[in-house]
Amino acid sequence: MAQLHRSSCPIACSLDLIGDRWTLLVIRDMMFFGKQRFEEFLESPEGISTNILANRLKLLEEMGLITKQPYSNHPRRMNYELTEQGKSLRPVLKALITWGLKHIPDTTIPQN
């Protein structure tokens, strides 16, 4: 996927890919809570809308962070799974957890 970057800064480039309001939450749900299906992502407490979720899943697949496989005879029912590149975001998410717990009052590790 060809993309124009705002700059060569690795932080800016990373944020261009995963820095929106929802992308890391979808990855979190897959990584830490084992969610794989569209309906499961909708159950998260943040309340992502169906159109935003569909868009994020498509973008994550285009970026090579997830793959999808049909799980029934119905062609639109998919299981989503992190690729190795997607799994490599684990330390980033763990660092955000650690930082949030330390610096943002009343945060806890979600128990989905």
Image (tube, helix red, strand yellow):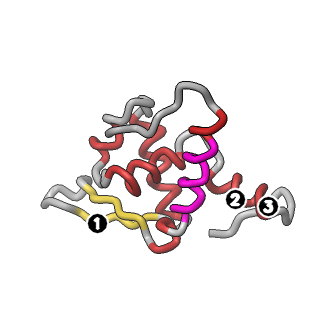
Q: Residue furthest left?
A: 73
Determine whether the residue tagged by mark 3 lies in a helix, strand or loop: loop
Mark 3 closeness class: few <14, some 14–19, many ≥20 residues within 10 Å: few
Residue lying at 70% horizontally and 52% vertically, measured from the top left: 15
Residue 56, compared with residue 104, is above or below; it is: below
Q: Which residue is mark 1?
A: 69
Where is residue 53? Give x, y as percent. Answer: 43, 42
Using the image as rendered, state which of residue 51 and residue 39 is in the foreground. 39
In this picture, which residue range is highlighted in magenta?
89-99
Determine which quarter of the picture holds residue 36: bottom left
Q: Amino acid at mark 1?
A: Gln
Q: Which residue is mark 3?
A: 5
Residue lying at 34% horizontally and 38% vertically, measured from the top left: 111
Q: Amino acid at mark 2?
A: Ser
Q: Residue furthest bottom?
A: 84
Where is residue 112? Give x, y as percent. Answer: 32, 39
Determine whether the residue tagged by mark 1 lies in a helix, strand or loop: strand
